[in-house]
Image: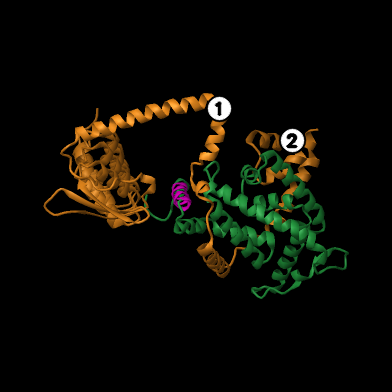
Chain colours: A orange, B green
Amino acid sequence: MKCEWVRENIVLQVYGELADDARHELEQHVARCADCAAELKAEQEFHALLAQDRAPDPTPNLLAASRMRLQESLETAVQGSFWTRLPFDPAIWLRQVRFSPALASAILILGFAGGVGTTYRIYGAHTATPGSPSTPSQVPAEASITGIRSVTQQPGSNQIDIKYDTVSTQDTSGSINDQRIQQLLLYAARNNYNSGVRMDSVGLLTQKPEDAHFREALMYALQYDSNPGVRFKAMDGLGPYVKDDTAVRDSLLQALVNDANPGVRTEALRLLEPVKADGSVRGVLMTLAAKDSSQYIKSQARTMLAQLPEID
Amino acid sequence: MAGLDRQPSDRRIDDTMLIREAQRGNRGAFEELVRHYDHAVLRLALHLTGTEQDAQDVYQDAFLKAYKNIGSFRFECSFYTWIYRIVTNLCLDHLRKKTVRKEDAPVVKDASGGEFDLLDQVADVRAGANPERDLMRRQLGARISGALERLTPRERMVFELKHYHGLKLRTVGEILHTTEETAKNTLFRATQKLRGALADMR
């Protein structure tokens, strides 16, 4: 019985599909049973034989030709009917509702409540903001933004212009306190492909580092941005918080130890100077002073350590 | 982090966005979605059908079908599973038809009595620097192809997705509308048959 189970599972073992406990059981058995060990070896050899024959990759020509042919067909292809194109299909919904009267009643009640709530809110909004500035289009949900094209601040004012793409490019403007602008800046700092735009966004975020979200985005940029200029810029906004915010201190320490760019590391070291007596900073400084690859960082770390009072 | 090394979760967000756009009738979004998956789809179709022409037909039919039905995609499974489901169904149809047509194929018997396809003997013009090794590899490929063709279409599909495309059996089960357990049993049967058919190769 045991051998039979092992025989059936050897193929899964070879393909790495066996659960950990089953794999352990199988290995234990194979170590004791010569027949099953031979079977495992045979299966492994067979696997190696088959591995010599790989599924060929389609040639670039074939891929290009297939794409072209598909594009031509898509020109004339028609998508399903209007109803099937809706992500929410009323027909299916009605069918489900028909069989669940309790759910139907609940939805009906919710519908009434929602209707009353919405009316109240619209009325309230109108009366509450008579003098609010005219706001252009609503910012779409983050998921529908495909990229940020540019971020510019108008000279001599606090107006920030942001061009962003959904399906088509859109334009919005407002002050840095504007929630829409903040949302787009945070998105651009993290997600944009264009490092110039990330740089502009991070630059604007450093104007208001007291906002926790902004500071978080700056730390993210310092840690993950591929462009050293953007990482350098992010530190501008973080510097003043090195004393009060331990997360900022940690992210600067991380940059000091791990950043690939010597300029970024040097700046991080400079910004950490006011907190050099802190335990974690002192620890890092000692490591750097002992064995950092950069002579400059090594000597700076030594100097900073020498200025510290001895610990008892 | 911005850049080309996108995380799988980024890809999922991208796909979700593209699917929603495609559902609203945006053809550009659909074409972008196609480019995320079409290399893998074409590779699968090419190996399963065996000819570039048939592979191209499967590719074309699969994505046209996806385009026409994307409105009914409700995010109950990943788009990856959904598109593979369409492709594997088309390939299974192809394999079933091929099994019926097989009697007409230019198959002859070799000296040891084993069947081989005359088309497999056509020289590969891309032969590299070592003709002997190329010849051996071609012979091995031809024998394996022959053995694969003797599997049932479903066994062939499970083996193909697992062995050549490295999918997890759980995913294979989802794609083929069956359980992981059934996929495991099918893989076991397929490898047993293949080992039997290629016993003299070892």
Is A213 displayed left or right of A309 in the figure?
right
Q: Is residue B60 magenta?
A: no
Query: From this viewpoint, is residue A42 visible?
Result: no
Q: Quadrant of the C terminus of chain A?
A: top left
Residue B41 sits above or below residue A2 on the image? below
Pick the front one: A187 or A8: A187
Using the image, determine if residue B193 lies above or below residue A4. below
In the rendered structure, the answer to whether residue A50 lies left or right of residue B17 reads: right
Along the line of sight, the residue nearer the viewer: B67 or A196 = B67
Residue A62 seen anywhere in this rendered image of the structure: yes
Q: Can you name the residue that lies furthest to the left here?
A: A156
Label 2 sits on residue: A29
- Distance, label 1 to label 2, CA atoms, is 53 Å
Badge 2 crowding class, 10 Å Cα cut-off, few under 14, some 14 to 19, many 20 or more, is: some
In the picture, residue A309 is in which quadrant?
top left
The amino acid type of the residue labelled 2 equals: His
Q: Is the N terminus of chain A in the top left, top right, bottom left or bottom right quadrant? A: top right
Q: Is residue A244 left or right of residue B195?
A: left
* Residue A175 rendering spot, x and y as whole percentages: 19, 45
Q: Which region is colored magenta?
A: B12-23
A54 up-or-down from A223: above or below = below
In the rendered image, residue A274, in percent from the top left (x then y), is placed at: 19, 38
Q: Which mark is residue A100?
A: 1
Disc nearer the start of the sequence (1/2): 2
